[in-house]
Structure formats: C-alpha cells, structure tokens
Image (spheres, rainbow, N blue to C red):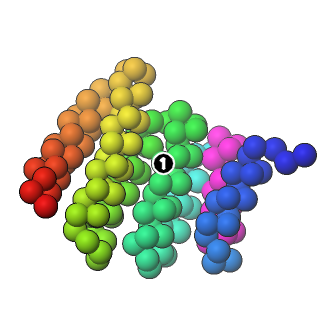
Amino acid sequence: MIRGSTIVKLICINRFRDATHVVSVSEAFDLARAGNRELAVKILKQEFQKLQSSDQKVELCEWIAGCFENLHDYGQAGEWYEMAGALSLAHTGSPLINALMAAAQYEKAIDCYDHGLSDGDEEAEESIQKCLEIIHDLNREYSAS
C-alpha cells in the first residue's frame, strides 16, 4: 500500500524531471516532513535559483506554498504564493493572462494570511492589505481589456 506522503512525493518528483532537482526536492520534502522546515526551505530556495524557466519557478513556488499550507505555516505559504504571483506577472506571454494568473496566486496568499490572522500573526493583516492592493491594481488595469 502506498502512503499519502509517498504519493505526494512521487507527484513532486514527477513534476521536476531533472535528476539534480529530483534529489534536492525529494530531500527537502523529507526534511520538511521530519520537522526540519528551515533546512527544507533553504534547499528549495537553492533549487529555485537554479531553475531557468519562469513556468518552473512558478510551479516550484506553488509546490513550496502547498507544503507550508500542509504544515500549517500559513505565513510562509502566503509569501511563496505572493512570489508565484509576482513571477506570473513577469511571464512573457499575454499581459492579461499573466495578470489573471497572478491574481489567482495573490488570492491564495490572502487565504493563507487569513489563516495566520486566526493564529495571532500580526504581520498577516499588512500582507493581506498588500495583496488586496495588487489585485485591485490588476483588476483596474485590465478591466478595460
């Protein structure tokens, strides 16, 4: 029988097919599950810097954010979703599609920060406001499109 954590790990490994990324992402996943989140984040940030494609970077940000959500570290999850949003805006495709993708990431960040508010995270309110302003600006800029 395959356990849930093994399935998640296989999905993540399958997502990053480059062998060096597989080992590091797999190692980071194991470290996070073992409670060593700081080292896991450090490894993932190093892998992030190695990626060339903005699509891969957005995908890795989303995966890291999801891991933090599963670990109930909503502040970190929100930060990674924000980074995915910022990277989505930098895509070289259609500006409107980029804005839509980014807005979705910022909304996920808000959801995570909202969880942080219930945990007494004082910085969460400021982060929520920043994300709301970005979404508002994106909506205003592209509503005429």
Q: Is residue 68 magenta?
A: no
Q: Judge from the rendering whether residue 87 lies leftward or rightward of residue 131; answer left or right.
A: right
Q: Looking at numbered disc 1 in the image, what kind of residue is underneath it?
A: Ala
Q: Judge from the rendering whether residue 14 lies leftward or rightward of residue 87; answer left or right.
A: right
Q: Nearer the viewer, residue 132 or 141?
A: 141
Crowd class of label 1 (few under 14; some 14 to 19; many from 20; radius 10 Å): many
Tag 1, which secondary structure? helix
What residue do we see at 13% from left, 61% from top? 145
Q: Please state the horizontal and vertical placement of residue 99, each as a whole percent of the image.
A: 25, 59
* Magenta highlight: main SS: helix
Q: Is residue 24 magenta?
A: yes
What residue do we see at 16% from left, 49% from top? 139
Residue 125 in view (yes/no): yes
What residue do we see at 68% from left, 64% from top? 13
Query: Magenta region: which residues?
Result: 20-35
In the displayed image of the protein, which residue is found farthest to the front?
Answer: 145
Q: Which residue is mark 1?
A: 65
Q: Please state the horizontal and vertical placement of residue 27, each as a whole percent of the image.
A: 68, 60
Please tell me in which quadrant of the rendered image residue 24 appears: bottom right
Q: Please state the horizontal and vertical placement of residue 130, each as a whole percent of the image.
A: 20, 42
Q: Please state the horizontal and vertical placement of residue 135, each as a whole percent of the image.
A: 21, 46
